[in-house]
Image (cartoon, rainbow, N blue to C red):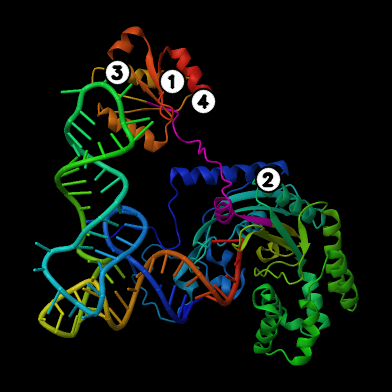
RNA sequence: GUGGUUGUAGCUCAGUAGGUUAGAGCGCCUGAUUGUGGUUCAGGAGGUCGUGGGUUCGAGACCCAUCUUCCACCCCA
């Protein structure tokens, strides 16, 4: 059997880890700049915690974990057994639901509004594609316990700040579930909101005709279709979109509320790259208010982030009246984008600055001592552990990307010096310890 | 979950209409060169052709199943 990673998963080499920690470091800084505190939750939850939170499609994509112990042995499992009977745990599907669980579980201790960020992998039993994995990282920031729309504004600015730091130009598209509900209401299809929004979300991809025919296929009649049509027009700017919606949705209380929320958020967003997009729906069905999605401007790779307001997610776990709003960064897609644009720093930071050669067994103790002392000075130094041919030791340094080598032989030992050689330039000089520390430190 | 696609040496790939012992480039190892690499030259190792069945005198090639890759749909980060 050929060893292989499981479908849709990846190993991360030193280089890749360096890229990932670069991006995660910037995100962490930004989260903390905005006052969010870190949280980590287990990789799996009780199955009832995750099931039913993401819609039917979501449930299908949840990785379920078989009951442990000898459960399987004395149970003849009927084919129609529910997955909850043979599985009692599930890998987390996102970070928001475990967060909601945490908030409810610790409601008494938390200071509200409670702001946390979380950067951990999530798992989905999806078919992999480019930028689409079965194990991937999300980096989330959420606030619960405040209905203020300033939270939405702040999260938009958090997005702006983070993507600026990452040097990845993005468009932040915003919409409001209440606007969508209002459109459905005034068109008389309030009971089929999900079918409507799912189809509308594809406008960019399949065009107006495509959306209309998909809706027709779902049983919408021609009167309903023409009622919904205004939602598919293109607005030149936010002002005209909002004024159109104000007249169109005048008869819907929810709709008007959504319009005003959207208006507030847009007005307060300052120079952030936000755009109103009334076709934006987002699949996760726990969103109730403002919804946000972020796409990279220069790369076509789906969305690199998304989020929104959820008024009652904690209600499912028994805590009423605790509204939350949050955003998510898709770490893996952000890295793919930056990679494609060549904007990840070259210097990975985890390569030694020097390699100490071992010329012979006799020279080894002294050579090792050089490495030992240089490390005490805080320099990343590696010691070549065998008296191999110099060609081999040079090749090793070259391949690891180590810029300097240190050669200590009999003559150097007597003089208390070491030869410091720059591999790129070929320059070599016999220097004392302090000079070598200075050279390597300033490299 | 649906449809298509991919898999041959460590890597990138050849392999013609099924026919001896499956090839190339790069990489790797050894030597020329026992304290100075990147060049050059000479030699060498490395493959149950993703896996399991089947058709055939004979399968890397054809058929079926399965896993994997990438793509589209679904959905999503």
Which of pointers 4 and 2 lies earlier in the amino acid sequence?
2
Of A340 and A374, which appears nearest the observer? A340
Labelled disc at residue A443: 4
Which of pointers 1 and 4 lies earlier in the amino acid sequence?
1
- Tell which tag, 1 or 2, sits nearer the viewer: 1
Q: Mark 4 lies on which chain?
A: A
Q: Residues within 10 Å of mark 4 (few under 14, many from 20)?
A: few
Residue beneath the point at 73% across and 72% down: A279
Q: Can residue A359 be seen in this view?
A: no
Inspect the magenta stretch and tell me whether residue A370 lies in it.
no
Secondary structure beneath label 4: loop
Labelled disc at residue A31: 2
- Tell which tag, 3 or 2, sits nearer the viewer: 3
Q: Spatial distance from mark 3 to mark 2, Cα to Cα? A: 48 Å
Of A13 and A401, which appears nearest the observer? A401
Side of A443 relative to B30 (left or right): right
Callouts 1 and 2 in the same chain: yes
Provide the residue designation for mark 3: A365
Q: How crowded is mark 2: few (under 14 residues within 10 Å), some or many (20 or more)?
A: many
Q: Are marks 4 and 3 in contact (CB under 8 Å)?
A: no
Callouts 3 and 2 in the same chain: yes
Labelled disc at residue A374: 1
Which of pointers 3 and 1 lies earlier in the amino acid sequence?
3
Which of pointers 4 and 3 lies earlier in the amino acid sequence?
3
Q: Residue furthest top?
A: A415
Q: Is residue A35 visible?
A: yes
Residue A384 picture location, percent across and down:
32, 28
Residue range corresponding to the magenta coloring: A327-355
Residue A196 picture location, percent across and down:
71, 80
């Amino acid at each position: 059997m050929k060893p292989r990673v499981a479908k849709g998963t990846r190993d991360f080499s030193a280089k890749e880890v360096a890229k990932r920690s670069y991006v995660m470091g910037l995100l962490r800084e930004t989260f903390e700049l905005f006052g969010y505190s870190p949280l980590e939750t287990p990789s799996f939850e009780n199955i009832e915690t995750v099931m039913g939170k993401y819609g039917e499609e979501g449930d299908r994509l949840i990785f379920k974990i078989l009951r442990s112990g000898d459960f399987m042995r004395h149970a003849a499992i009927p084919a129609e057994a529910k997955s909850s009977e043979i599985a009692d745990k599930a890998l987390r599907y996102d970070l928001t639901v475990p967060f909601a669980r945490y908030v409810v579980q610790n409601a008494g201790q938390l200071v509200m509004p409670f702001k946390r960020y979380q950067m951990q992998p999530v798992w989905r039993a999806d078919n992999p594609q480019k930028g689409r994995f079965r194990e991937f990282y999300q980096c989330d920031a959420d606030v619960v316990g405040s209905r203020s729309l300033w939270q939405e504004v702040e999260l938009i600015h958090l997005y702006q700040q983070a993507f600026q730091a990452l040097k990845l130009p993005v468009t932040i598209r915003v919409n409001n579930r209440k606007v969508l509900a209002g459109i459905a209401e005034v068109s008389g299809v309030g009971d089929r909101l999900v079918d409507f929004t799912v189809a509308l979300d594809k406008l960019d991809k399949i065009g107006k005709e495509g959306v209309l025919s998909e809706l027709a296929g779902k049983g919408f009649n021609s009167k309903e279709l023409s009622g919904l049509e205004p939602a598919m027009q293109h607005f030149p700017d936010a002002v005209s979109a909002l004024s159109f919606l104000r007249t169109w949705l005048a008869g819907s209380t929810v709709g008007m509320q959504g319009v005003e929320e959207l208006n507030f958020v847009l007005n307060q967003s300052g120079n952030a790259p936000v755009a109103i997009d009334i076709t934006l729906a987002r699949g996760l069905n726990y969103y109730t208010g403002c919804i946000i999605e972020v796409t990279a401007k220069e790369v076509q790779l789906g969305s690199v982030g998304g989020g929104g307001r959820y008024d009652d997610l904690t209600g499912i776990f028994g805590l009423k009246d605790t509204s939350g709003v949050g955003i998510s960064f898709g770490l893996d897609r952000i890295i793919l984008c930056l990679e494609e644009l060549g904007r990840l720093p070259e210097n990975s930071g985890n390569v030694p600055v020097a390699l100490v050669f071992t010329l012979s067994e006799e020279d080894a103790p002294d050579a090792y001592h050089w490495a030992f002392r240089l490390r005490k000075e805080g320099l990343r130094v590696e010691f070549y552990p065998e008296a191999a041919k110099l060609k081999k030791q040079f090749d090793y340094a070259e391949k690891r990307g180590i810029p300097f080598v240190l050669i200590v032989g009999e003559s150097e030992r007597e003089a208390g010096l070491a030869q410091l050689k720059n591999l790129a330039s070929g320059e070599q000089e016999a220097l004392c310890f302090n000079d070598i520390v200075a050279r390597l430190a300033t490299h």
